[in-house]
Amino acid sequence: MTYIITSLCLRDSGCVDVCPVECIVPGKPVEEWPWYYIDPDTCIDCGACIPECPFEAIFVEDEVPDAYEAKGGEQLSMPKGTAGFDEVYEGSNHHGEPVHLESVRTLEAGETIDLTQDIQPNYDYFQDGPGYSALD
Ligand code: SF4
Ligand code: SF4
C-alpha cells in the first residue's frame, strides 16, 4: 500500500517538506504531469503529508474515493488538452511561488467524481514517466 495524490492537487507543495523519506516530487513537465506524485516504492505510509494538503488531495491508496462528493469549488487539474478541462488556475504555493495550471475544471456542489482513476499516474510517473530518475 502507499499514499496517493489525486487530481485535486494544485501544486501547493506543502506535503513535500514534511515527508520523512522525500518521496513526493513535483510532476514535470507540468503540462503532462500536473500534480505532485508519491513514489510508491519509497513511501513508508506515515501519513504526515495528509494534513499538510490545503486541498485534501492525498489519500491512503485503498481509501481513494470512487464517488467523491464535491463540496463545490474544488478544482481538478489534468494534463493539457484533456476534454472538459478548459479553465486556468493561477495561484501560489506553500512557498509563495506562482502556480499556473492550464487544464482545470471546477466542481459543482454535489457533483460526484471517481478519483480512483488518479491512482495509476502515481505509479506511472515513477515507472515509465520522468519520475523514473526523479529521486536519484
Ligand atoms: S500539499 Fe496537496 S496540493 Fe500541495 S503538492 Fe501536496 S498534494 Fe498537491
Ligand atoms: S505517507 Fe509519509 S512517507 Fe508516504 S508520501 Fe506521505 S509523508 Fe511521505
Image: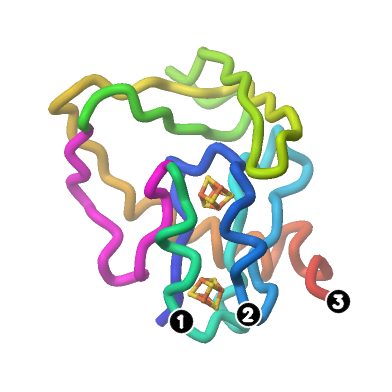
Name the residue at 18% across, 46% down: 67
Whether tag 2 and tag 3 are in contact, CB under 8 A, the answer is: no
- Disc 2 residue type (three-letter): Pro
Name the residue at 26% across, 66% down: 63
Q: Which residues are magenta?
A: 55-70
Name the residue at 36% across, 62% down: 59
Q: Position of residue 89 (x, y in %)?
A: 57, 20
Q: Secondary structure at mark 2?
A: loop
Q: Tell me the CA gap for discs 2 and 3.
A: 16 Å
If the image is split into quadrants, where does the C terminus sit?
A: bottom right
Q: Along the polypeptide, which appears first: circle 1 or circle 3?
A: 1
If the image is split into quadrants, where does the N terminus sit?
A: bottom left
Image position of 81 with respect to 131: above or below:
above
Q: Along the polypeptide, which appears first: circle 1 or circle 2?
A: 2
Whether the magenta-drawn stretch holds residue 58 is answered as yes
Tag shown at residue 20: 2
- Disc 1 residue type (three-letter): Cys
**Would residue 45 be found to the left or right of residue 130 on screen?**
left
Report the residue marked by disc 3.
Answer: 136
Whether the magenta-drawn stretch holds residue 118 is answered as no
Under 8 Å from ligand 2: the CB of mark 2? yes
Report the residue marked by disc 1.
Answer: 46
Name the residue at 60% across, 34% down: 79
Whether tag 1 and tag 2 are in contact, CB under 8 A, the answer is: yes
Q: Nearer the viewer, mark 2 or mark 3?
A: 2
Categorize mark 1 by other alpha carbons within 10 Å: few (<14), some (14-19), many (20+): few
Q: Tell me the CA gap for discs 1 and 2.
A: 8 Å
Q: Secondary structure at mark 1?
A: loop
Q: Position of residue 21 (x, y in %)?
A: 66, 81
Under 8 Å from ligand 2: the CB of mark 1? yes
